[in-house]
Image: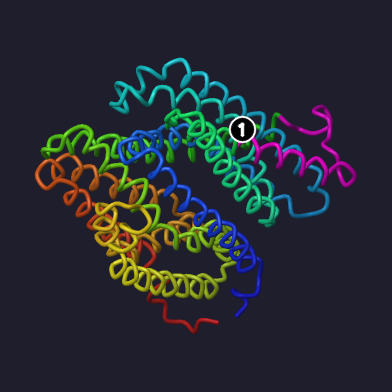
């Protein structure tokens, strides 16, 4: 069972431990936010998510993946000195993009909040978040560098540090304001984002400087072909960035449209934002806590499948595919039963919200599909079928948007939940078709 004895398994355990700890901390953090600010302000804060996702996709995500890929390719000793240059070039490019993107968000926060997010109270949150984007670029590129080295310790620890510093900052500022008799503003949560990214970026920079100062210091710009490396990073990151930007744009349209379409179902503006806040800030994050395991697996599964495919080791791909599918489905079914049985209790006990309990029970039916999706997508990418993965994801998001625009006004939030279920069903079905040769392969699997 070599699949369970290599770095994929070890790296997955490390990332899962960190991710699960971070999710648990985040879960209690959201409980604190919901009890401190209320459902409506949570809805306003959650509207910031589309901006975070889009700007990260534009300035960081594709470059982080490129750094990881090219660092991993420098496997022989002669290529080792190139690795720091790849990192430095990636940080320079990503930092430049993030500064430009952050400046745009800061300058045009008002029209973005009014015309895109359809909520003018988001402008201040956008301006605060814009400050954190360059810090995310540094943090993301260094994480990509260590993923390329197949070392997950630093990314795992920096993830935990970011979450801890965010929670401590928000908790401290809220306590300070409450002690002075003032009602805390939801902008404090955005300040927590900045402090969290600052902490992780500073830690990552210090760690990599300390680790490399004696082993192989960063070479000078003139000694190695940085222009050629930048060209390689650009060639890989641009299509990745465009794909993720398009997908996340669809996600963003979906997110900002839900409160607006809920108005057409008969809810008031305050009730629509409250229901959106409960769904995206309480119920969904709780349902996604167990997906920490599958998300960690998907991060490290891509290079494993890619390597097996390049070596024509079909038996490895089949073995990994079948084990991942069985494991994800088992986890999804078990968690689905648990959330359905305890949803009302969790919503009332932890979030003090009956709405949260109802939504948790409704979302429990999605667990098997949600936990399986990222792993199947990662396998497709590892097999070089990124185009198929993109097309399937785009179709899935289009189905969800149709439900958002046409079902929510008629059925309320139930229309969106139906769209989620149906689109995830279609998504998994189409990916299984794309991977059918590995599901029904007849040779003996080692």
Residue, x 42% and y 49% (percent of image)?
31
Q: Quadrant of residue 313?
A: bottom right
Residue 34 in the figure: left or right of residue 57:
left
Residue 73 lies within the magenta run: no
Label 1: few (<14), some (14–19) or many (≥20) C-alpha neighbours in 10 Å: many
Residue 320 in the image, given as x and y percentages of width and height: 51, 71
Residue 328 in the image, given as x and y percentages of width and height: 42, 69
Residue 210 lies within the magenta run: yes
Outermost residue toward the right? Answer: 214
Residue 65 in the image, given as x and y percentages of width and height: 57, 45
Residue 15 in the image, given as x and y percentages of width and height: 59, 59
Dot 1 falls on a residue whose secondary structure is: helix
Residue 230 in the figure: left or right of residue 366:
right
Quadrant of image for the N terminus: bottom right
Q: Which residue is mark 1?
A: 135
Taking depth in this image into account, of 406 and 378 the one nearest to the observer is 406
Residue, x 50% and y 36% (percent of image)?
174
Taking depth in this image into account, of 74 and 310 the one nearest to the observer is 74
Q: Over which residues does the magenta segment extend?
A: 197-226
Quadrant of image for the C terminus: bottom right
The image's colouring method is rainbow
Taking depth in this image into account, of 24 and 446 the one nearest to the observer is 24
């Amino acid at each position: 069972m070599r699949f369970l004895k290599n770095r994929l398994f070890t790296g997955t355990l490390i990332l899962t431990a960190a991710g699960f700890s971070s999710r648990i901390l985040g879960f209690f953090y959201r409980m604190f936010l919901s009890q401190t600010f209320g459902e409506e302000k949570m809805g306003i804060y959650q509207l910031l998510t589309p901006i975070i996702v889009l700007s990260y996709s534009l300035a960081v995500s594709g470059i982080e993946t490129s750094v990881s890929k090219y660092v991993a390719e420098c496997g022989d000793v002669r290529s080792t000195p190139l690795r720091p240059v790849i990192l430095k070039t990636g940080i320079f490019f990503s930092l430049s993009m993030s500064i430009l993107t952050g400046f745009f968000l800061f300058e045009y926060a008002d029209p973005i909040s009014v015309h895109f997010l359809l909520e003018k109270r988001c402008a201040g949150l956008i301006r605060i978040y814009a400050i954190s984007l360059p810090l995310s670029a540094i943090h993301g590129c260094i994480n990509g560098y260590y993923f390329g080295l197949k070392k997950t310790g630093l990314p795992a620890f920096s993830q935990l540090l970011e979450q801890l510093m965010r929670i401590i900052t928000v908790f401290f500022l809220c306590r300070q304001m409450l002690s002075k008799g003032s009602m805390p503003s939801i902008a404090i949560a955005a300040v927590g984002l900045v402090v969290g990214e600052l902490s992780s970026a500073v830690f990552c920079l210090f760690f990599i400087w300390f680790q490399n100062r004696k082993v192989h210091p960063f070479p000078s710009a003139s000694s190695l072909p940085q222009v050629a490396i930048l060209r390689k990073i650009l060639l890989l990151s641009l299509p990745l960035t465009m794909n993720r930007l398009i997908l996340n744009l669809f996600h963003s349209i979906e997110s900002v449209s839900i409160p607006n379409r809920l108005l057409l179902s008969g809810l008031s503006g305050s009730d629509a934002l409250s229901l959106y806040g409960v769904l995206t800030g309480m119920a969904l994050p709780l349902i996604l806590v167990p997906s920490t395991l599958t998300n960690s697996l998907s991060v490290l599964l891509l290079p494993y499948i890619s390597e097996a495919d390049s070596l024509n080791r079909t038996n490895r791909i089949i073995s990994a595919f079948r084990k991942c599918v069985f494991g994800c489905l088992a986890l999804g079914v078990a968690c689905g039963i648990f959330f359905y049985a305890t949803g009302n209790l969790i919503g009332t006990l932890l979030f003090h919200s009956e709405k949260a309990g109802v939504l948790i029970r409704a979302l429990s039916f999605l667990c098997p599909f949600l936990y399986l999706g990222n792993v199947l997508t990662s396998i497709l990418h590892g097999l070089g079928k990124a185009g198929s993965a993109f097309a399937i994801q785009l179709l899935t998001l289009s189905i969800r948007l149709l439900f958002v625009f046409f079902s929510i006004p008629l059925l309320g939030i139930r229309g969106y939940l139906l769209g989620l279920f149906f689109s995830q069903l279609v998504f998994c079905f189409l990916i299984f078709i794309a991977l059918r040769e590995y599901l029904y392969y007849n040779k003996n699997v080692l």
